[in-house]
Amino acid sequence: MYYVVVYVTVTNFSHIFLVQNKTNMSFLYKMFKELQSVFTPVSGDQSQTHKNVLHKQNCDIVVLNCKEHKQDPLLKKVKELAISQQSQFKPGYASELSIACDFPLHKGLEYYFVAVTRDKDQTIVDICGFAFVTKDDRSPLELETLASKSYTNVSYKGIGTLLINSIKQYFQNDPKIIGLSVHSRPEALPFYEKVGFQRLGLLTRDLFLPFERYHTYNHDDADVFSYHQSIAQQLNDQNTLAQLKLHNQEY
């Protein structure tokens, strides 16, 4: 007698096994449970463990400023990989990275945060995901694009969060940056809210992620003050509005 076992993986591929006896059945059951423990999402305090399990590629972040790195060989390498790996991203996204810094889209500064893996010689061999951010001369920091290979490969899950955290860390000491704004696609709203973004109104897809400086109320720049006040109003953050009024009476 044979037992038929069908196992469906997280990538939606079915595996069929013919098991001759119950001893082998028990072995397969234990193996499936171990696989399930690897791919079951976790939350809360377990998030760091989740990152370590799923980031099999050990991606690290490269920051490219179009003003400073337009002729950088590193940018050229990233663009070449984006072309060769475009089928591994959601259609259209990798092509945006492949023309990074070629056509300035913003009057201010443009930054690409690229999650990459390297070989033993530290040569970049893979792109895990990327974020495109623009910064104008006043205050707004805008997330224009966020993409990762998790769209086609679950082992890249968590790259989006890694990129968001890298953006926060990179700009945390900029006195004019109080947070990150994004206009989200409908299907991406749950992700952005999960990583800390707040909606700027009940029926909008515009969201804002406060940085530490959002809770610093003294401003030497009238434009930064005005932007901070506008964001607090859209968030209906009455405490911040009161603190801004108290600390910036000259405005």
Image (tube, rainbow, N blue to C red):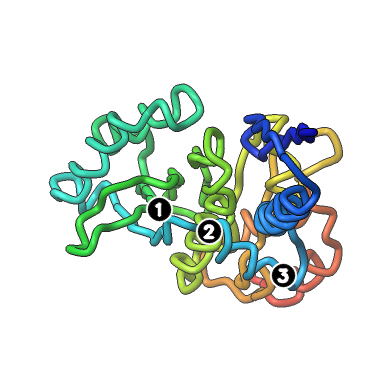
At label 2, the amino acid type is Leu
Q: Which residue is mark 3?
A: 46
N-terminal of the pair, mark 3 or mark 1, is 3
**How far from the left and from the top, in percent, is residue 141?**
51, 51
**How far from the left and from the top, in percent, is residue 174?**
46, 69
In 3D space, how far apart are the residues under numbered discs 3 and 1 (Cα atoms)? 22 Å
With 170 as the anchor, is 99 left or right in this view?
left
Residue 162 visible in image = yes
Q: Residues within 10 Å of mark 3 (few under 14, many from 20)?
A: few
With 101 as the anchor, is 30 left or right in this view?
right
Q: Which residue is mark 1?
A: 115
With 229 as the anchor, is 108 left or right in this view?
left
Q: Residues within 10 Å of mark 1 (few under 14, many from 20)?
A: many
Contact between marks 2 and 1 (CB within 8 A): the answer is yes
At label 3, the amino acid type is Gln
Contact between marks 3 and 2 (CB within 8 A): the answer is no
Q: Nearer the viewer, residue 222 or 97?
A: 97
N-terminal of the pair, mark 2 or mark 1, is 1
